Image: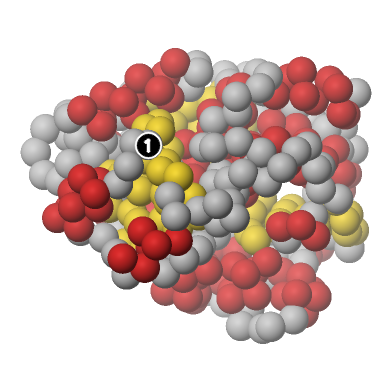
C-alpha cells in the first residue's frame, strides 16, 4: 500500500548516527534549493468559536474542565446555540501554526477540507487574509465545516468541544502535491491519524515532500490522540519524522512513563530535532546528544492558553526554515507562545516581527 515508503516493513532502527550536525548552526543548506514556500501544513480545517464563560456553564452541560472532547453535529449545534457571544476565527492546530509563521514573514501554505457553508467561508477568508496559500476545494456534499467550541473560564483554562465535520473528508486526491513539493518543511498534525482517509493523505504528502528533498515535521497534537495511535506514532517518530513537536503530557504518553527525563531519553536520536513544551517550565530542544533548556517569556497576565503550542511551533519552524540555530528556534517559539497566552484566541493581536525585534535582536 501507500504506507510502504514512509513506514518500511523491515525492523526500524534508531537513526542516532544520522543526525545532521549542520542543524546546530545557522545554515539554510539543510533544505532543498529553490523552495518557493517555507512551511506547508496539512491539518483539520476548523473554525474556532471562543467563548468566555463561567465554570457553571461547563457543569450545566457536563463538560470536563480543561478537557477536549469530540462531539457530533447535533451536539455542536445545541452547544453553539446555548453559548454566549464568541470570537469566530479560522483555527485548527496546524492552521494556527501556519498563520503564526505568515505573521512572522514566512511563506506558508495550508491543505485542509471545509464545506461550502458560512463557517467554511470564514475559514477560507481568514487564512488567506494573512497571506497563507489555501487552495483545497470546498466539499459540496457531506458534513458541514468543522468547528471547535472553546470555553475559556476566568482562570484562563480552556475546555474544547470539537466537531470534525468536513475536515475528516480530506482524501489523497485532494492534495496539491505541487505545493508539498515546493516547501522546505511539511508540517502534519497527529489528529489526522483519526481519519483513515486523512491518514492516507498524510502519508502520500510526506512521501512526496521527502522525495523532493523537503523535511517532515509532526505535532503529536493531544495526549488522548497519542493513546489512540501510540504504535503508529512510535513507528513514525523512529526515523521518519525530521522535527517532532510534543508537550510534556504527549511525550510521556508516547513512551508510557510518568517521568519526563525518561521520556526525553527515549525520544533522543529518533528524530533530527525534538521540541517539547512544558507550560510554565519552558521547553526542551534535543538534537543528537545536545539539549537546550529554553525559558518562558512572561509578557503579561495569562488570559487564554488556546494556541500556545501552535504558536510555539510557528516561531520554531520560522526560525528553523531561515537557518537559525536550534536554541534561537526554541527562543522564538517561546516568545510567540508567551505572547499568545496574554490574549483571547490564537491569532496574535500584536506584530510578531516587532515583538521579535524587541526581545530577540
Residue 266 in the image: state x and y as whole percent. Answer: 73, 75
Residue at the image point whose x is 74% and y is 81% from the top: 259
Between 222 and 271, the one lying in front of the other is 222
Residue 26 in the image: state x and y as whole percent. Answer: 87, 32
Quadrant that contains the C terminus: top right
Residue 283 in the image: state x and y as whole percent. Answer: 78, 55
When asked about the image quadrant of residue 247, the answer is bottom right
Residue at the image point whose x is 52% and y is 37% from the top: 345
Report if residue 269 is visible in the image. yes
Looking at the image, residue 307 sits to the left or right of residue 274; the answer is left
Between 151 and 47, the one lying in front of the other is 151
Whether residue 108 is situated above or below residue 296 in the rendered picture: above
**Circle 1 — which element?**
loop
Outermost residue on the left side: it is: 141
Whether residue 114 is situated above or below residue 13 in the rendered picture: above
Q: How is the image coloured?
A: secondary structure
Q: Around disc 1, counting alpha carbons within 10 Å, would you say few (fewer than 14), some (14 to 19), or many (20 or more)?
A: some
Between 182 and 120, the one lying in front of the other is 120
Whether residue 19 is situated above or below residue 330 in the rendered picture: below
Quadrant that contains the N terminus: bottom left
Report if residue 42 is visible in the image. no
Looking at the image, residue 229 sits to the left or right of residue 223; the answer is left
Between 353 and 172, the one lying in front of the other is 353
Looking at the image, residue 351 sits to the left or right of residue 24; the answer is left
Residue at the image point whose x is 34% and y is 29% from the top: 123
Residue holding disc 1:
86
User: How many discs mark residues in the rendered view?
Assistant: 1
Residue 152 in the image: state x and y as whole percent. Answer: 48, 50
Residue at the image point whose x is 49% and y is 42% from the top: 94
Amino acid at each position: 500500500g501507500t504506507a510502504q515508503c514512509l513506514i518500511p516493513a523491515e525492523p526500524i532502527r534508531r537513526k542516532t548516527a544520522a543526525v545532521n550536525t549542520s542543524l546546530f548552526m545557522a545554515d539554510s543548506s539543510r533544505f532543498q534549493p529553490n523552495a518557493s514556500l517555507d512551511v506547508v501544513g496539512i491539518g483539520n480545517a476548523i473554525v474556532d468559536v471562543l467563548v468566555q464563560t463561567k465554570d457553571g456553564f461547563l457543569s450545566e452541560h457536563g463538560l470536563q474542565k480543561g478537557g477536549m472532547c469530540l462531539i457530533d453535529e447535533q451536539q455542536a449545534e445545541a452547544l453553539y446555540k446555548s453559548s454566549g457571544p464568541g470570537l469566530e476565527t479560522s483555527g485548527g492546530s496546524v492552521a494556527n501554526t501556519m498563520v503564526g509563521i505568515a505573521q512572522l514573514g514566512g511563506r506558508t501554505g495550508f491543505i485542509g477540507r471545509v464545506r461550502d457553508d458560512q463557517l467554511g467561508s470564514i475559514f477560507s477568508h481568514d487564512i488567506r487574509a494573512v497571506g497563507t496559500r489555501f487552495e483545497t476545494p470546498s466539499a459540496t456534499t457531506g458534513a458541514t465545516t468543522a468547528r471547535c467550541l472553546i470555553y475559556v473560564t476566568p482562570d484562563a483554562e480552556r475546555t474544547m468541544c470539537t466537531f470534525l465535520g468536513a475536515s475528516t473528508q480530506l482524501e489523497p486526491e485532494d492534495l496539491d502535491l505541487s505545493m508539498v513539493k515546493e516547501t522546505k518543511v511539511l508540517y502534519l498534525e497527529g489528529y489526522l491519524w483519526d481519519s483513515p482517509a486523512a491518514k492516507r493523505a498524510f502519508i502520500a504528502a510526506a512521501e512526496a515532500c521527502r522525495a523532493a528533498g523537503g523535511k517532515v515535521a509532526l505535532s503529536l497534537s493531544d495526549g488522548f490522540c497519542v493513546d489512540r495511535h501510540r504504535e503508529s506514532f512510535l513507528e513514525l517518530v523512529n526515523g521518519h519524522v525530521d522535527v517532532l513537536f510534543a508537550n510534556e503530557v504527549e511525550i510521556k504518553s508516547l513512551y508510557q512513563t510518568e517521568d519526563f527525563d525518561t521520556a526525553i531519553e527515549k525520544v533522543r536520536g529518533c528524530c533530527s530535532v525534538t521540541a517539547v513544551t512544558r507550560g510554565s517550565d519552558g521547553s526542551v530542544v534535543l538534537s543528537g546528544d545536545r539539549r537546550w533548556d529554553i525559558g518562558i517569556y512572561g509578557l503579561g497576565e495569562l488570559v487564554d492558553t488556546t494556541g500556545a503550542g501552535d504558536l510555539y511551533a510557528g516561531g520554531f519552524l520560522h526560525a528553523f526554515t531561515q537557518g537559525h540555530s536550534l536554541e534561537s528556534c526554541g527562543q522564538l517559539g517561546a516568545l510567540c507562545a508567551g505572547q499568545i497566552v496574554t490574549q483571547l484566541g490564537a491569532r496574535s493581536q500584536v506584530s510578531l516581527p516587532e515583538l521579535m525585534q524587541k526581545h530577540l535582536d
